[in-house]
Amino acid sequence: MTHIGPSITFDGVLTCTESLRLDGQVRGDIVMRDAELTIGQSAKVDADIRGVRVLILGTVNGNVTASERIELGASASVTGG
């Protein structure tokens, strides 16, 4: 599993083929290929997300699309774009 820590800010298109835990900030688009994406509680995402399985515990501003499932934790905040 790859981890993007809370001190990291990423702008652009993030493409990943392995499981990813995101605790930092992302602006742009996130494309997950055959892997799970976890948006941690401290994460702030301003991006459209496309993936297979998405677990959201933090803040997402953008559209979320998953081919298998989307899970929202109690601390999740999601605003569609």
Image (cartoon, grey):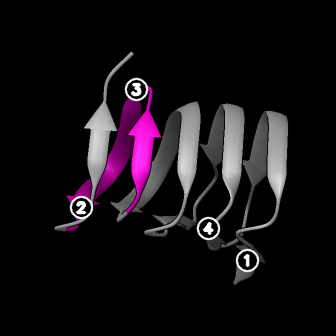
Q: Position of residue 25 (x, y in %)?
A: 68, 49
Q: In which quadrant will I find the N terminus?
A: bottom right
What quarter of the picture does the C terminus occupy?
top left
Residue at (81%, 49%) from the top-left corner?
A: 9
- Dot label at residue 3: 1
Relative to 41, say whether 54 is above or below. above
Query: Where, by quadrant of the figure, is residue 74 drawn?
Result: bottom left
Q: Are marks 4 and 1 in contact (CB under 8 Å)?
A: yes
Q: Which mark is residue 71?
A: 2
Q: Amino acid at mark 2?
A: Glu
Magenta part of the chain: 58-73
Q: CA distance from mark 1 to mark 3?
A: 22 Å
Name the residue located 82 percent from the left edge and 44 percent from the top edge.
Answer: 10
* Coordinates of residue 39 in the picture (x, y in percent): 49, 62
Instruction: Please name which of the two marks, 4 or 3, marks the residue nearer to the observer.
Output: 4
Lower sequence index among marks 4 and 1: 1
Query: Where does the image place residue 59, in percent across and percent down from the top left?
Result: 41, 48
